[in-house]
Image (spheres, grey):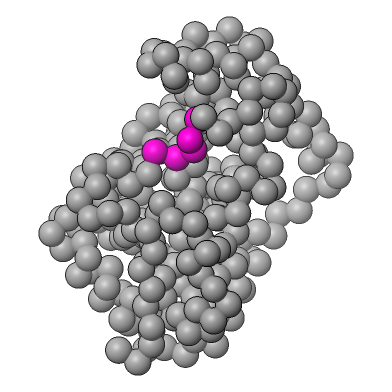
Amino acid sequence: MSGMCFAMSSSAPYRSQISASLRQLVRAVILRAPAGSAVFSAGHDMRELPTHGRDPLTYNDPLRRAVRAIELFPAPVIAMVEGSVWGGACELVLSCDIIVASDDCTFAMTVGKMGVPYNISGVQNLMNACGMPLCKEMLFTASPMPVQRLVDQGIVSQAVPRARLEAVTHNLAKQIVTNSPLVIALLKEELRLLSASHNLGPETFERVQAMRRHVYDSTDYQEGIRAFFEKRGPLFQGK
């Protein structure tokens, strides 16, 4: 192989794994969970969510930093997914450049079920990745979606039996690393800029932030967190 491919665990700190020197050397990254995982990622650790009127998803939230690390890394990041994917981990996977999944995995965007006011950049990432109709279905139902639905929509590149997952993913990485890293980095940045070219005016942004603040100050937000730890369904009152 004429380039370098770097495999990274979905549970490890991103910035500590990808040093400045690696950014120059690595031509492809594979993001994965431990082999054989039943759950690729359960999303946010609910214990980290604030409960005293603070925004739970700020610019420096670990999920936001991880998504930016993937988007801004110059080489393609391939998500190799097996098991179920929950909550913010859906956005993390969908932010990767290419997704290869086991044919039994599911994706569930559960923020509506948990009562968490997802932030606008995260919603935009989901919309760009999934398209409006599927994005709405995932967000509004909060139900697990079979991977084949995402394959049919062109969101997941391939869904293969678990026994073939590593071989298929590594073969893709091998194809990528033989190409010009400068051209690949340019193409990735061009695609990122084009997909993000939806500007919001200051008034619109402030209005959305006010709506989010109304959610994380609400009784429903507290109820979602309580219900999770009490292992019961939430009883949302809309206030």
Name the residue nearer the viewer: 187 or 214: 214
Identify the residue at image location x=51%, y=60%: 14
Magenta: main secondary structure: loop
Residue 134 sits in quarter: top left
Residue 192's spot in the image, x, y percent?
60, 66
Identify the residue at image location x=51%, y=15%: 226
Identify the residue at image location x=47%, y=90%: 180
Residue 55's spot in the image, x, y percent?
70, 32
Work out whether 63 lies above or below 211.
below
Work out whether 177 lies above or below 8.
below
Q: Would you say 203 lies left or right of 102 here?
A: right
Residue 68 sits in quarter: bottom right
Work out whether 84 lies above or below 235.
below
**For residue 45: magenta?**
yes
Q: Would you say 161 lies left or right of 199 here?
A: left
Quadrant into which the C terminus falls: top right
Q: Would you say 211 lies left or right of 63 here?
A: right
Name the residue nearer the viewer: 137 or 41: 41
For the view shown, which residue lies furthest in the right direction? 203
For the view shown, which residue lies furthest in the front direction? 16
**For residue 119: magenta?**
no
Residue 42 sits in quarter: top left
Name the residue nearer the viewer: 132 or 175: 175
Quadrant into which the N terminus falls: bottom left
Start and end of the magenta stretch? Answer: 42-46
Q: Is residue 155 visible?
A: no
